Image (cartoon, rainbow, N blue to C red):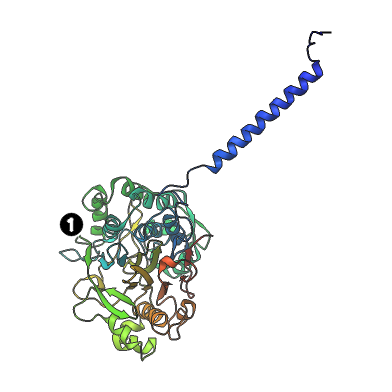
Amino acid sequence: MYRKPTAPSAKLSQTRSVIRRRQRAGLGVLLLTLAACTAPPPKVGEIGAVAGFLGGTVAGEPRAALVARDMLSAGGTAADAATAAFFTMTVTYPVAVGLGGGGICLYYDHRSNKAETLDFRARPPAAGGTVAVPGALRGMALLHSRYGRLPWGQLVAPSETLARFGHNISRALAKRLTPQAEKLRADVTAAKLFLRADGRPLAESENLVQVELASILTRIRTRGLSDLYGGVMGRQWLAAATSLGGKATIEDLRRYRADWRKTERREIGNAILHFPGLALGESPALKLSRLLNSASVGAAAAQVFGGADLARTEDRGEAGIVVGDSFGSAAACVFQMNGAFGNGVVAPNMGVFLSPNIAEAQGGGWSGYPLPLVAANEHVQEAVLATAGAGGPAGAAAAIAVTVAAMIDGKSLAQAMLVPGRKSAEAGSVQAFSCPKGIRTGAGSCKFAADPQAFGLAAFDKF
């Protein structure tokens, strides 16, 4: 007998409704999970773009090393990382790095299988005077334009943020700031930035805000370097320099050029060790490398450098950085302010220290320091070592000593960094990395080391 279907009970309808809601919720979770699993990986320019070993960087100031590592992680080259580290140190390490100074870099490019010297030292104006024409911004722009991969603005932005919103002073800066309190006290602007109201210098972890420097970095990020070498920013710098007895003109700024030069070379096993090619004849650096085969660090330095210069222990306002990327390229740079905090005077409304026109910056020949070094195996087209010695003859001798110990004596990098005869960090320091099998082999054979006598940082691989 046929029975007409009856409507489901209210309880059964409610149960079915609950089941449907749960099914829809489960489906939503599943779709979200699948979307997460299929999300595109970070693009070049985003941190995390490089999977696995990304290279590494060692800097005399820790925050600069971390910023440089971020650029490597984003797919940048050693040139990108070195440029970003420079701008960061103009904020976090002005004792040795600044827009008013200069420096020297060695760069090995794996694509062209060639190493070059980049000379951007602060130089004397045509008419002389007490203030040198800055070269650092020209140098970094030239390095980036030839070997960079990331956008210019991305390299400047971290330093701009640190200057505008402040950063906690690192131990590296605090240790070099304390002896310079009297020098900074003589300039009103410098004293307001780096000294307390009672005249004592800021200590480690205290916050430092540099709003005027941040505005300059904003202009550099958005306008490039032309504003300093011929625009409004350049005229601000000229006014400050003139007030100190400087004789630079706007033409001196416009004519300044950073120079690419060849390197001097020494063959060591399967690798070529490159020295800055800045001198006529065999450079003191190359002589040092030969002498260290049979002499101690101190004895070799005494034969190459003048006794009076070797005995000087004041802070020369230098800092080093080395970078190796996962592509096989490497950079080694030493930045200079020609004295701790330059001449101790901040250009008004700029937050930039001026560099004095000293004998080492007057062109013609080269004293052999500061000393960046890069070694590469040209057969496989990748860097195997980079060192950067800063702080006068002691820094140059330290860089050579570490290089010889690692490449010729077969010591580990940790052993090489403790070579007997090195002087204190105040007189000279060295940053280094060593990859005997080539940097592309990864973290298994590569070692990165900051000077154990100073307070820098080695940042590499994944943390």
Quadrant including the C terminus: bottom right
- Residue depicted at 31% across the width and 66% down the height: 107
Residue 333 at what x, y percent from top left? 34, 67
For disc 1, the marked residue is: 249
Amino acid under disc 1: Thr
- Residue depicted at 46% across the width and 73% down the height: 451
Tell whether 31 sits left or right of 148.
Answer: right
Q: Of 446 and 253, which appears nearest the observer?
A: 446
Q: Of 50 and 206, which appears nearest the observer?
A: 50
Residue 338: quadrant of the picture: bottom left
Residue 270 at what x, y percent from top left? 34, 78
Residue 50 in view in this figure: yes
Residue 358 at what x, y percent from top left? 26, 71
Q: Is residue 259 above or below residue 426?
A: above
Q: Residue furthest right?
A: 1
Number of marks in the rendered image: 1
Mark 1 neighbour density, 10 Å: few (under 14) some (14–19) many (20 or more): some
Tell whether 378 sits left or right of 420.
Answer: left
Q: Of 325 and 255, which appears nearest the observer?
A: 325
Tell whether 8 sits left or right of 451.
Answer: right
Residue 305 in view in this figure: no
Quadrant including the N terminus: top right
Tell whether 230 sits left or right of 434.
Answer: left
Q: Secondary structure at mark 1?
A: loop
Residue 368: quadrant of the picture: bottom left
Residue 309 at what x, y percent from top left? 31, 82
Residue 307: quadrant of the picture: bottom left
- Residue depicted at 31% across the width and 86% down the height: 290
Q: Is residue 245 above or below residue 268?
A: above
